[in-house]
Amino acid sequence: MMKHYFIICIIVLAIFSCSCKKDISSIGLNLQDEDILNAEFVTAPLSAHSTLEDSINTKNLLNNVVGTINDPVFGQTQAGFCTQFAVSGSNSFFPKQAVLDSVVLTLQYSGYFGDTLSPLKFHAYELSQPLTATHYYSNDDNPAIFSADLVTDNNYLYPQPNTSVYVDTTSKAAHLRLHLERSFGNKLLKMNRSQLANTSAFQNEFYGLCVQAEARPSRTGNLCYVSLTSAMSGITVYYTVDRVHKKYTFPISKDCVRYNFYTHDYTTASSNFQRQVIQGDTTMGRDELYLQPTAGVKTHVSLAEVPNIFKDRNVVINRAELVLTNVSTDEDYFYQPYNLSLQVVDKDGTTYYTPDDASMTSSGYFGGIYDEKTKEYRFRITNYVQYIIKNGIKDDGLNVVVNGAGVRGNRLVFRGTDNIYSDNFRLEIYYTEL
């Protein structure tokens, strides 16, 4: 009996010891809605403004983007990409008697942004300088190209990212087919065994392609998302040997260097956008704020007033949520992003994650995903708010950005910080005073 009593005492002491060591900053992390019913609530004032984004890494991303879009709020965005190609298998070669039939660049669709009923005119140019695996490629890397456009069809094409394509009577996944100049096809067909011996040798002879597209000035246009490393994408040479039709495909392997580049023309953007983002009038952020991927626009947020609300008070933050409301829901083609991200901005301008970020916790906890019913994005930043209340603000605020900004075009117009709006950009805080 005494032995059992001794064991129970040890267990109780261990539980008590663990509970005493709990960090006050972690209190409230797993609270459910019912746990904050008795907490105090305050909406903290924010100041925010939208500004041009810095350059971003666009090398070897999941998707590539090509096209042009004319946006009444954000102006014009043009997107293109550069990529290397590989050889198929080993010991590749074309017989000397091979005669070229055609050469086709195929690009498998993986999505789009904009109006697919607005046609695009596609262009492909041979790279005049090699791409290297060690180089950092960003959105503003201007490609070095030869001037000759290799696409033979100069007509505008309607992208069909959701329509299967029949090739040799076989249905294939939706993809774009661009016929290239015969001179280019013959260049590939005339390569010898040593030039086609392996991918490295081939890439020393042919550096790759740069692909771009333009929209009609009076039309909305669109940005096509393409999966370069899919089995459907590549350059296919169709040729005949002794009356036998054959084909050979140069694919784009995962080891091939590829990158996206973007250019923005904001002279056609809305006047409110230009006044805030281009001319730097930060007061405009009280009414309306903007986010644009493709190295376009971010929104900077200051929480400087938050520590003052709780000055000389001992509080535990039960929940803190940053709330953004989409106000461009009536747009026909310019759909909002699926999810957003937050960056803490250090004093030297570098960025890092908040302690609440999905990479530290989970997407279910952190949030940032669009809610169709409420038209809102919510970020839970409980740990971050607890920290700045306890330690003061040691950084230069937060940036709100579109998640996956290098591979998609979905942009956002959201309500500003002025509390005259019921759906204003705000920080909601539930707290307990000790």
Image (tube, grey):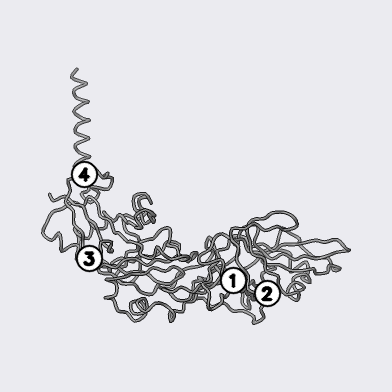
Q: Does dot 2 land on a helix, a strand or a loop?
A: loop
User: For the point 80% across and 69% down, which residue is it?
Assistant: 100
Cα distance in 3D space between marks 2 and 1: 16 Å
Q: Position of residue 118 (x, y in %)?
A: 56, 70
Cα distance in 3D space between marks 1 and 3: 42 Å
Q: Does dot 3 land on a helix, a strand or a loop?
A: loop
Instruction: Using the rendered view, name the quadrant where residue 229 is placed.
Output: bottom right
Reading the image, the residue beneath label 2 is: 151
Q: Nearer the viewer, mark 2 or mark 4?
A: 2
Reading the image, the residue beneath label 4 is: 21
Identify the amino acid type marked 3. Asn
Reading the image, the residue beneath label 1 is: 119
Q: Position of residue 102 (x, y in %)?
A: 76, 69
Reading the image, the residue beneath label 3 is: 419
Identify the amino acid type marked 1. Pro
Q: Nearer the viewer, mark 4 or mark 3?
A: 3
Which is more toward the observer, 49 or 344?
Answer: 49
Q: Residue furthest top?
A: 1
Cα distance in 3D space between marks 3 and 2: 54 Å
User: For the point 13% across and 61% down, which residue is it?
Assistant: 311
Cα distance in 3D space between marks 4 and 3: 40 Å
Q: Does dot 4 land on a helix, a strand or a loop?
A: loop
Q: Residue furthest left?
A: 312
| Circle nearer the N terminus (2, 1) | 1
Q: Position of residue 173 (x, y in %)?
A: 64, 56
| Circle nearer the N terminus (2, 4) | 4
Q: Nearer the viewer, mark 2 or mark 1?
A: 1
Q: Position of residue 369 (x, y in %)?
A: 39, 55
Identify the amino acid type marked 2. Val
Cα distance in 3D space between marks 2 and 4: 68 Å
